[in-house]
Amino acid sequence: MTQTPTRSDFDQYMVPNYAPQKAIPVRGEGSRLWDQQGKEYIDFAGGIAVNALGHCHPVLVDALKDQADKLWHLANVYTNEPALKLARSLVERTFADKVYLCNSGGEANEAALKLARRWAYDHHGERKNRIVSFGKSFHGRTFFTVSVGGQPKYSQGFGPVPGGIVHGDFNDLDSVRDLIDADTCAVMVEPMQGEGGIIPADPEFLKGLRELCDANDALLIFDEVQTGVGRTGSLYAYMQYGVAPDILTTAKALGGGFPVGAMLTTDRVAPSLGLGTHGSTYGGNALASAVALAAVEHIDTPEVLEGVAKRHDLFREHLETINRKHGVFKEVRGMGLLIGAEMRPEYEGRAKDILPLAIEEGLMALVAGPNVLRMAPSLVIPEADIAEGMARLERAIARLVADQ
């Protein structure tokens, strides 16, 4: 087929569950992209915290090309060397003893929730099945994960949701004390809510959840799909809080743009996901595992992780400068290079209106709900690209203010 696709082809041929911007990027290098017409964009979106090393990073490209000439896929009736190397690397770098490999964050969270219930069933019986989560949380798009997630809009209209799921208020330990009891099998929480508005957890909140889980023999699950693999300035955010979960999920940046996910857990819990209890056709395939191993090894270095903290400070400085001039943000928050800027009341719900203006100015950004501008750029984005991207963002915000 020689026809060049256009944005209208999306509306004609694809299910309308997305509303992509008009520009169609065709090439990327580092933190810059070019569309079909050759227009350049600076990328502050990072594929929604996925492209942790930017676009076409040579370390990842080399790993992909090298593995592509060797072996792609076997399915789980065999194992393969890249999967075993990746699993070992994750175990050696974290609290975990065992790893389950899959293809996405939603799949990792589905596996975590199934494991938690199966573990409770094995050790305590059918009654211990309650899962506690939090309002405004997001854990994926499978039916189980949208039910556990604290945003009903994602599960409405699809029929009865699974039972045994309750929600407390994020960062409010008192709101969950009465929800966690002998019938609770697991508490699932994001160390920093992403889709819920880029809200970091209070340290005492996570420590309190750990204590409540221990007191009731429940498992603590950290959803680090968005915060993991260097995003917050450590390999995983739990390391900055000093609170280790029983189960951790990771994806997005894990493959630096190649689809891959993982669930990490301990020897105490892992046996409940025994032979035949769960699976994934593509999970742990050699191609994805080779790229993920290269990403983890490159990111988990002082040079990259210390650079995240420095870049965080630069983003905040630029955003605060823009805000002093235009007065659109109520608060700038986040950890590492997952940053949110909440709109002031007079601009309520208008964060989403910045995105098309930014595209016109040559910048890609995100929102976390209609009221929070979100940025999740490459962990190694050059300082010059930060400065230029912020100049483009300021022009977009100036246009927003002019139209207010």
Image: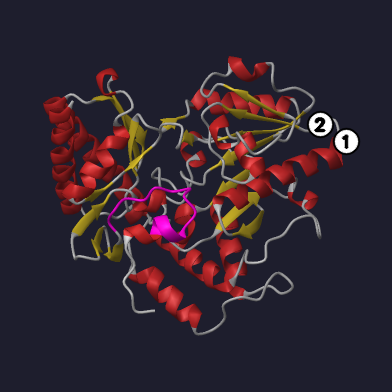
Secondary structure beneath dot 2 equals: loop
Can you tell which quarter of the image residue 181 is in? top right
Q: Which residue is located at x 62 percent, y 59 percent?
A: 101
Secondary structure beneath dot 1 equals: loop
Q: Is residue 246 visible?
A: no
- Pick the quarter of the image with the N terminus: bottom left
Q: Residue furthest bottom?
A: 69
Q: Which mark is residue 125?
A: 1
Q: Residues within 10 Å of mark 2 (few under 14, many from 20)?
A: many
- Asked if the residue at tag 2 contacts the one at tag 1, i.e. Cβ–Cβ closer than 8 Å, the answer is yes
- The residue carrying mark 2 is 128
Number of numbered discs on residues: 2
Q: Which residue is located at x 58 percent, y 35 percent?
A: 149
Between 345 and 6, the one lying in front of the other is 6
Q: Horizontal and vertical percent for residue 303?
A: 32, 55
Q: Is residue 74 magenta?
A: no
Left or right: 315 as drawn, with respect to 283: left
- Pick the quarter of the image with the C terminus: top left
Span highlighted in magenta in the image = 10-23
Q: Residue furthest right?
A: 125
Q: Horizontal and vertical percent for residue 197?
A: 41, 31
Left or right: 89 as drawn, with respect to 216: left
Magenta stretch mostly in which secondary structure?
Answer: loop
Q: Which residue is located at x 17 percent, y 39 percent?
A: 396
Amino acid, disc 2: Lys
Left or right: 199 as drawn, with respect to 264: left
Can you tell which quarter of the image residue 61 is in? bottom left
Q: Horizontal and vertical percent for residue 158?
A: 64, 39
